[in-house]
Every structure is written in C-alpha cells, then in structure tokens.
C-alpha cells in the first residue's frame, strides 16, 4: 500500500524532503477548505498542518487511512485529541523545535520592559532625551515564577540562570525538579515576574482571572507567550488598573484576527496599549528562521519512530 501524506499549511521545504526519505508520497494543497480536505483525507496515511482549521471527530470519521497527525508548532488546541485517541491516531507536536525561540523572545520582552527599551527608542527617534524617565530596573535579584514547566518553561529557566534570579517553577502535572520546584502559592507570595507556558485547554481557558491576579502579594510583570484565551483582556486591564500588573508583555491575544474585532474588543485593546508598561508582538515568539526548520526535524523524527520503532 502506498503511504501518502497531505500537507495543508505552509511549512519548511525540508518537511516534504524528510517525508520522501521515509518512503511517503507527499501532496501539498494549501488552499483547500475544510470540506474539500475532508473529501480527500481518506486517501492519506498522514496529515501535516499548523492552524488551518479545527480537526474534529466528524473530520476524523472521513480519515479512514490516517495513521498520524503532525502539527508544525507547539499547541494542540485545534485538534480533538479525545477523538484521535478513540481512533488510535497518534498526534505529534513540535514543542522541542521552537523552545529556544520562545525562551529568547520572553527574555527580550522582559529586558525591554525592565529597561524601557521600546519607549526610550521611540522618544529618541522623536528628538526626546529623557534619562530619568527611562531609568530601568535590574532583573538580577528578582523572583521569577514560571507556570508550566515543559519544553518552553525549562528552556526559559536555562536562560534565566545567568541573571542571578530566583526561579519558582510550577507545573500541575509534571512537578519541576529541585531547586526550582514550587507550589502556586509560593509564586503568589514571592514572584516579581510571572511567565506563562501552559497549553490551552478547558482547564486553562481564562486562567488569568481576577481571583488569580488578586492572589499576588506584590505587583508583577506578567508575560504570556502561550495562548491568548489563557489571559482574557478584561482581566489584564483590571490587573493593570489595580496596580497588580506593573508590566505586561503579550505575544498572543484571545482573538488574533484583529480586523474582526468587535467594538468591545477594540476598546479593551486600546485601553491596554495606553498603559506605558505594555509590550505586544504578533504571535511570533516561537517563529524564527531556525525554529521553522527545527520544527520539521522534530516531527520527521517522531514520524520515523512511529513507523520504525
């Protein structure tokens, strides 16, 4: 039987090359709708995607020959994992491939907020020279809470070690090893900075609630490079207005289709961006030239292991 893989999102060219080396035929159709994809998916052994559409149970019913799904990225919130498990279809992500990119991006966000690099740059470009107003603060000596200690959280931890900080790492499902392991209550009590690295699930949707923010004993810099719905904008705005959040860096938003925003969404974002200690980027923390290739290498190895354990 011919093994065929369907690629429905733009990925690095090395993906097709790697699949060919494993004996797969590869079709790459980037403009198919979900219905069009569903009509042909029964021909394929594997499916490669990024964020094209939600893979649900109905779609999987049509995928009679499917042996694996590989997502060229980290999160799996756009795939019905329960339905995949019921049909015995392994699902692969590539967290290992962009962990370095995410960690470096978070470090850049943190250093930018601490040393006011974005506002200082804008002012100097506009002929404004304010040294005192742009006095920064040092990361050294601060306590940093990492919530979620998988590939991303561990990679960030490695980079923080050289800054002379205390790291408190909390993961509900895989406790962090000593000396970093901590309870969430420890982070609430001691953290100056908090970086979120949890997947988007029913449990983490809206994770950054008013109750969550109210639990911190001192103002925090909050960084979210995981998924937008984890930190609803209305709660972030409340945290800023209450002085609980002293600095905010977001690489993700609850609705990243910004041209489809409602008036309420636009109003919330306008209020957020008016705060001087906020920093935004367009979901690119894990999206470097290097990670674009490394993500493929990770997936190819997982696929190879599946068929040649």
Image: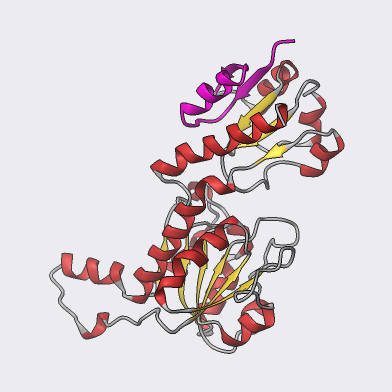
**Measuring 62% from the left and 48% from the top, which residue is drawn there?**
75
Residue 171 lies, in percent from the top left, at 68, 67
Comparing 86 with 157, the one in front is 157
Residue at the extreme left = 127
> In the displayed structure, would residue 59 be above or below residue 25?
below
For the C terminus, the quadrant is top right
**Measuring 43% from the left and 84% from the top, which residue is drawn there?**
141
Comparing 160 with 83, the one in front is 160
Residue 268 seen from this side: no
Residue at the extreme right = 86
**Measuring 56% from the left and 48% from the top, which residue is drawn there?**
96
> In the displayed structure, would residue 28 be above or below residue 125?
above
Residue at the extreme front = 309
Tell whether 278 sits left or right of 33.
left
Q: Magenta stretch?
A: 1-29
> In the displayed structure, would residue 176 be above or below residue 25?
below
- Magenta span includes 8: yes
Residue 167 lies, in percent from the top left, at 54, 76
Comparing 139 with 8, the one in front is 139
* Residue 25 in which image quadrant: top right
* Residue 88 in which image quadrant: top right
- Magenta span includes 129: no
**Measuring 61% from the left and 79% from the top, which residue is drawn there?**
213
Tell whether 19 sits left or right of 14.
right
Residue 160 seen from this side: yes
For the N terminus, the quadrant is top right
Residue 275 lies, in percent from the top left, at 41, 74
Residue 28 lies, in percent from the top left, at 55, 20
Tell whether 71 sits left or right of 277.
right
């Amino acid at each position: 039987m011919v093994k065929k893989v369907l690629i429905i999102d733009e990925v690095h060219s090395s993906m097709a090359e790697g699949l060919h080396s494993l004996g797969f035929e590869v079709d790459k159709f980037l403009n198919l709708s979900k219905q069009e994809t569903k009509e042909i998916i029964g021909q394929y052994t594997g499916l490669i995607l990024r964020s094209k559409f939600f893979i649900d149970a109905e779609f999987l019913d049509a995928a009679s020959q499917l042996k694996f799904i590989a997502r060229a990225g980290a999160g799996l919130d756009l795939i019905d994992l329960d339905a995949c498990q019921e049909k015995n279809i392994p699902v692969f992500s590539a967290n290992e491939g962009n962990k370095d990119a995410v960690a470096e991006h978070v470090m850049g966000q943190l250093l930018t907020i601490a040393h006011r690099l974005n506002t200082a740059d804008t002012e100097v470009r506009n002929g404004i020279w304010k040294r005192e107003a742009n006095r920064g603060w040092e990361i050294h000596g601060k306590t940093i809470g990492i919530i979620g200690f998988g590939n991303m959280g561990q990679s960030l931890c490695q980079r923080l070690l050289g800054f002379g900080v205390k790291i408190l790492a909390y993961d509900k499902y895989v406790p962090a090893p000593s000396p970093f392991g901590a309870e969430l209550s420890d982070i609430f009590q001691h953290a100056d900075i908090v970086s979120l690295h949890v997947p988007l699930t029913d449990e983490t949707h809206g994770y950054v609630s008013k109750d969550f923010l109210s639990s911190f004993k001192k103002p925090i810099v909050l960084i979210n490079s995981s998924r937008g719905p984890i930190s609803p904008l209305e709660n972030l705005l409340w945290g800023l207005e209450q002085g609980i959040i002293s600095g905010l860096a977001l690489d993700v938003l609850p609705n990243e289709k910004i041209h489809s925003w409602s008036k309420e969404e636009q109003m919330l974002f306008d209020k957020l961006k008016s705060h001087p200690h906020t920093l935004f980027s367009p979901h690119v923390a894990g999206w470097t030239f290097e990670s674009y290739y490394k993500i493929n290498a990770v997936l190819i190895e997982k696929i190879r292991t599946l068929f040649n354990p």
